Image (cartoon, rainbow, N blue to C red):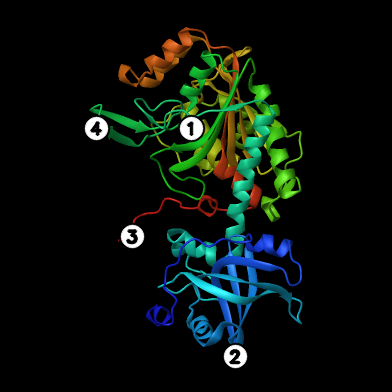
Amino acid sequence: MERLRALGFPPYGGAFARTGSLEEVREGYEDAKEVRVAARLVAKREMGKSIFAHLQDGTGRFQVYAKKNTLGDDGFEAFKVLDLGDQIGVEGALFTTRTGEQTVAIRGWTLLSKSLLPLPEKWHGLQDVDTRYRQRYLDLIATEEVRELFVTRGKVIREIRQYLHQQEFMEVETPMMQALAGGAAATPFRTHYEALGTDMFLRIAPELYLKRLLVGGYDKVFELNRNFRNEGLSRSHNPEFTMLEIYEAYGDVSTMKALIQGMISSVAQTVFGTMVVGEGERRVDLTPPWREATYAELICDAAGEDWFDLSPEEARQRAASLEVPVNAEWDAVELTQEIFEKRIEKTLVQPTFVTRLPIELVPLAKACEDDPALVDVFELVIGGWEIAPAYSELNDAVEQRRRFEAQAGGDGAKIDEDFLTALEHGMPPAGGMGVGIDRLMMVLTGSVAIRDVILFPQLKPKG
C-alpha cells in the first residue's frame, strides 16, 4: 500500500463512472469501443513490458491488458505492485487477442480500494466449510457456482413476487416484534421493549396479523419476510428463515393448491427453463398435477394398516420396531407424527400434497366436514422436506377461542385476545398458505443443506 501511495496511487479512491458491468461490456462488445470498468483484480500475468490480468465483479470476469509504453513508468510499475484482491477502475479500448479473448487495452487506471489481506488460494478455492459460511464474502469471490446460486435466489424471489402481483395479490408488511408469539407452535426469541417496559417476541409467523387484514377488507395479501424460531440448527433448519405467507378471502385449501402448483412451476420454467430440477435421487419433476395422499394413508403404508387400532403400548412397540424414537409422555397424535417425520416425510421426493391432518396438529385450520377430528389442510412435501402447509382457515371465533384455550393449557396470557376480537368482527372464509423460501431454494438448486442457500446462516460463535 505504501509503495502504491509513493507512486501516486492513493489506496482508497472515490466513485468511478462505469460503462457497465463486465457482463454488459461483454454483451455490448465492439472492436475499438471505449469503455470504463471497475472490479476486483483476481489474476495477473507479467510479460516483461506488458501485463495481462483478469478483473471480476458480480457478473463475471473480463481480461485487461497493460503496456508500459502506454501507462508510463510509474503507472506500469504501480500496476505491477497491485495485489490480487485490489479493486481498480480502468479505461481503454476493446480488442480481441489472438486467442480470441475479449480484452480492454488499458489507457489509464486508478486504485479504488487496496486489499490488505490475501484472497483464498487461486487454484484450490475456498475449501474450509466453516470459513465459507463465516466469511461468505470470500466464498462469493472464490467460487463462481456459489455466487451464481445467490443470483438465482434473487431471480426466484423476484419471479414469486411477479407471479403473485399478476394474480392481484397485494404485498404487505406486518410487525416482526410482537407482544404474543402466535400463528404457529414454536419456541420464540424474547426481547425487551425499553420504551414500553415490556417483554416482546420476534415473530414465529405473521399469520394472525395477515388475517386481521382479511377482516379489514383486503381480499388477497402476501408477505415475504423473516420469521424467527428459537429452535435447533440442522441441515434443513435455520432459526432465522425466509417465509412467504399468502391469504385469499373466499378461497380454501383447494385455492391454495392451485396457487402453489402454478407459482412453483412458473418459477421453475421462468428461472431455470425446465420443470425437472436436482440430480440423482433428489431429481424432482415439478410438472403439475402433483400427487395427493391423505396423512392416514401414508401412516398405514409405513406403520401397518392396523396402526390406528393399536393400543398405546402396542403403538410404542410398533414404533420401536420401525426404529422411531419413543417418548413415554407422547400421546397417540404425537407418536404418529413422529413416525411421519422420521419414516415418511423424507421419502416423499416428488411433489406430494399430504392432506387431512389431525386437528391437534393444526389449531388454526377449519375441520373437515365429514370428520371433525381432521382438518382441511395440506402439507406440500418436495425433496423430502415440508415446503408449504396450507389451510382452509378457521373463521369461527367461538371455536378458535376454544382451541386457543386448549393450546394454552389454562394460561390465559398466551391467548391473543386482540386477534380473537378481530375474528369476532367477522373474517371471510379464506385459504392460507406458508411457503418456506429457503427449503424451496434447496429443491430448485439441488442443495443438500439450508446453509448453502442462505447468505449468512446462523453459526455457533467461535471460541
- Amino acid bearing label 2: Lys
Residue 55 is drawn in which quadrant?
bottom right
Q: Find the distance from the CA under tag 4 to the CA under tag 3.
A: 30 Å
Percent position (x, y) of residue 74? 49, 85
Numbered marks: total: 4
Q: In front of the other: label 1 or label 4?
A: 4
Q: What residue is pinned by disc 1? A: 335
Nearer to us of marks 3 and 2 is 2
Task: Give the distance between the C-alpha atoms of the residues marked 3 and 2, in whole angstroms.
Answer: 47 Å
SS type, badge 3: loop
Q: Which mark is residue 194?
A: 4
- Disc 3 versus disc 1: nearer the observer: 3
Secondary structure, mark 2, is loop
Q: To which residue does mark 3 refer? A: 462
Which residue is pictured at 31% across the width and 35% down the height? 190
Residue 448, given in percent of the width and then of the height, sits at: 58, 53
Frontmost of labels 1 and 2 is: 2
Mark positioned earlier in the residue sequence (1 or 4): 4
Three-letter amino acid code of the residue under disc 1 = Leu
Q: Earlier in the sequence, mark 4 or mark 3?
A: 4
Packing grade of label 3 (10 A; few <14, some 14-19, many >=20) is few
Q: Amino acid at mark 4?
A: Glu
Nearer to us of marks 2 and 4 is: 2
Are circles 3 and 2 on residues that touch, CB within 8 Å? no
Q: Amino acid at mark 3?
A: Lys
Position of 459 relative to 341 (above/below): below
Residue that label 2 marks: 49
Q: Earlier in the sequence, mark 2 or mark 4?
A: 2
SS at circle 4:
loop
**Residue at the image point whose x is 65% and y is 74% from the top:** 63
Q: Position of residue 254 (x, y in %)?
A: 68, 22
